[in-house]
Image: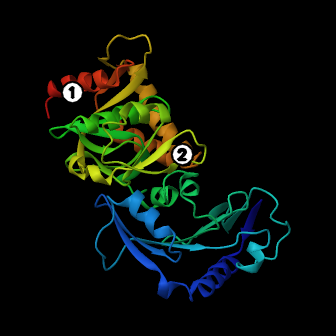
Amino acid sequence: MVLSLHTEQRANCFRRLRAALEPLLPGAEVFYLDLGGVRTVRILACEKEAAPMIRRQLAWSLTAPVPSPDATLILWRERVDADFHRRVLGLDVEGDGSGDNLILTERKGEDLVPFGEVSYANRTVRLTDGTVTWYATERFEPEEWIREGHLFVHDLYRILDTPSSHLVHGACIGLDGKGILLCARGQRGKSTLAVTAMLRGFDYVSDDYLILEKSREGLLASPIYSIITLSPTMYTRLYDDLDRARFVCNNARKDKYVFDISGYGDTLRRRYPVLSCMFPEIDPDAKEARVEPCSPAEKGRAITHLVHSTILQMQAQGDAGTVRKLISFLQELPFHTIRLSPDIYGNVECLRTFLQTQER
């Protein structure tokens, strides 16, 4: 159900929310994130169970306190029942909370601008006034923290949406300052390739979500999360190499394992120059991997994969501005296809050979 509020009704929601949380804030554990030098975020964790998951998922972004963070996230435990919108937000509206969610919007002229969602199905609440985001959940089991993606990923997506930066769903690795952005939807081998490359001495940025920044130096990639996700099959194949990784949880669908890889911090690179893009194609019959230049059509397909996957993951359908911005970030870069063979280590060596022939 979509609920359109007048400005005063919206303001009253936030007044009630602040009053309800005021007793919790003095005991909150405080974290600060440095998001690739683009944005800084303060997290107030009012629930102690949240602190370990913040450290495990965001170890590579945690930083010392900053005086004026760009955004604040407030996290607490709340009973998100069918009466939440009345009990906490003071919204006496039709509906008993039996649907999947309640979308809160403010009418501005002819437009309805969303600012909050009560998800009765997932037992979560998220409201934002643009600078502060309030996030409540009933469930603090590790698997629940990966159900909608990585921790706070939808909030960080919004915070990192600037004229010169964006959060994207992709992977980035490189050698000697020569970065490759892997553009593909899920289940196309990019995580396996990125993680195996990291284990074989490549520079590593991310295997899933990362920050792209358009700067005077060119396109730069930075990490956010210190976790990876692997299928059980790939985990079994990489088991002996993943000696510094720590198991975190299954994902909510139980088809991926989540690992804390902060122990591999020596491979991590920030603001890493992206010199080219690569589109992985799995070829189960290939005896060895090979890299080929993309045709114009293949380049368009690769960009479409990255843009579509990012928008789908962030539930940002219909955002034409994001599409134009990401295309502008990528369109001048050279694109290649890597045909992946069943030999995951051979795929990495093929990539190494390719990068060794590239100029910075």
Q: Callout 2: 10 Å neighbours few (<14), some, many (20+)? A: some
Label 2 vs label 1: CA separation? 30 Å
Q: Residue at x 35, y 42 (%)?
A: 329
Q: Eyeballing the image, is 167 above or below 203?
A: below
Q: Eyeballing the image, is 113 above or below 170?
A: below
Give the color scheme: rainbow, by chain, secondary structure or one colour. Answer: rainbow
Q: Percent x, y for residue 42?
A: 40, 73
Give the labeled residue for mark 1: 352
For the C terminus, give its image quadrant.
top left
Judged from the image, the secondary structure of the residue bearing numbered disc 1 is helix
Amino acid carrying mark 2 in the image: Gln
Amino acid carrying mark 1 in the image: Arg
Judged from the image, the secondary structure of the residue bearing numbered disc 2 is helix
Left-right relation of 97 to 175: right
Left-right relation of 295 to 230: left
Q: Nearer the viewer, residue 12 or 350?
A: 350
Q: Quadrant of residue 143?
A: bottom right
Q: Nearer the viewer, residue 184 or 12?
A: 184
Q: Residue at x 47, y 81 (%)?
A: 28
Q: Residue at x 30, y 57 (%)?
A: 36
Q: Percent x, y for residue 354?
A: 21, 23
Q: Nearer the viewer, residue 147 or 234?
A: 234
Q: Callout 1: 10 Å neighbours few (<14), some, many (20+)? A: some
Could one spot residue 311 in this view of the protein? yes
Give the labeled residue for mark 2: 313
Q: Percent x, y for residue 65?
A: 31, 76
Q: Nearer the viewer, mark 2 or mark 1?
A: 1
- Mark 2–mark 1 contact, CB under 8 Å? no
Q: Percent x, y for residue 256?
A: 52, 40
Left-right relation of 63 to 168: left
